[in-house]
Amino acid sequence: MAENKPPKKADTKLLLVSWGLGLALVVFYVGYWVFVAHKIETQLEARKNADFSFASAKISGFPYRFTLTIKDLHTKIGQVTVLRSEELSASASTFEPQLWVLEGAIRPSIWLDNPAYSDTVAFQFELKPDNFQASVRLDPKSREIERLSIRFSGIASSGSQYPEIFSMGRGEVHLIKDNTNNNYAFSVDLNAVTNSLNTSLPNRLLLRGLLNNPQNLNRNWDYWTKNGGIIDIKYGMFGEKAGVQYADNMRGKLNFNSEGKFSGKINADIGLRLGPHRFGPFNGSVYLKDSEVDEPATAQELMEIEAFRQHEALLNSGRTF
């Protein structure tokens, strides 16, 4: 019968070292997870402002990941509540806490607090939760947004006076930071847009361009607009050539002043269809100004506005080019 020999001292020492290293790794990982989770919660609390607010933000998911749960979330751009949700959850890998992917949202919606149709009626644009996807990558040091992507396959609206006033099909919004040129590149692609109050609304809108001063924009929209914010549209189009109206090769800038009011000019190739007749494309400019901006038009602007009005009069007369 073989005799059981006691383990050698070397074997016992190796086993103790292995256990010690394993225990140290566990303690390190737990400490790391708790530290990062607390840091994320603290940074979110510090970012609360008029454009970003919530009731509570908690991190869970130990030990496999970070799961962020935000309750009563409100994010705004000016008077438009971009996203409101009773509860939103997103997750990130424990070793890549700067990349977050949306996991779910309870009753996500968009609100227009002051719609153009009325000063008293607020319209709610409901996003279908099953079709709403989003991801965001944050800078590991500054915690500023490096990349933001939002996708959805449908938006429907409801309002107390105008139910089902607005609907939209597939849409995508992307924002990517360019550190070299200190700006954000953006892309907005919206499809199957319908509006019961405006049947001529183009059914597609595509805009691509740049937003300056990412640091200011990460603070909040109001601060960005009042400190030299610029929307530089590099390309845009709306409608379809087979539709009632369309515009292609849209380009121009919107500049914000110290009061947060904007003004600018958009240039585009425009075409219209009146019955069997098609007009254009012709090149035209549209001058956009906030209703409270009081800046006199230049002589060149007045000439271009008059030329555009003449084009409109010609189109409305039913004559062809």
Image (cartoon, helix red, strand yellow):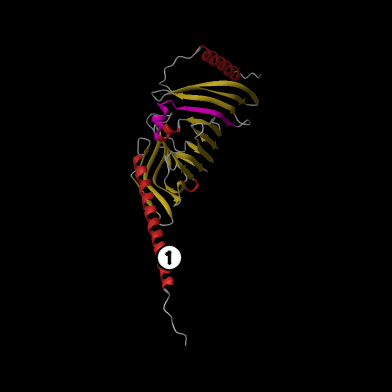
Q: Quadrant of residue 50?
A: top left
Above or below, 66 against 300 in this view is below
**251 and 109: which is toward the camera:** 251
The amino acid pointed to by label 1 is Ser
Image position, residue 144 (x, y; %): 43, 39
How many marks the image carries: the answer is 1
User: Residue 29's quadrant in the figure?
Assistant: bottom left
Q: Is residue 129 above or below residue 206?
A: below
Q: Residue furthest bottom?
A: 1
> Taking 63 as reference, is 234 above or below it?
above
Q: Magenta part of the protein: which range?
A: 219-239
> Regarding mark 1 in the picture, which secondary structure is present there?
helix
Residue in the foreground of this view, choosing between 22 and 98: 22
Left or right: 271 in relation to 54:
right
Which of 207 and 171 lies nearest the eye of the viewer?
Answer: 207
Residue 252 in sight in this render: yes
Taking the view exactly as shown, the residue that stands out farthest to the front is 9
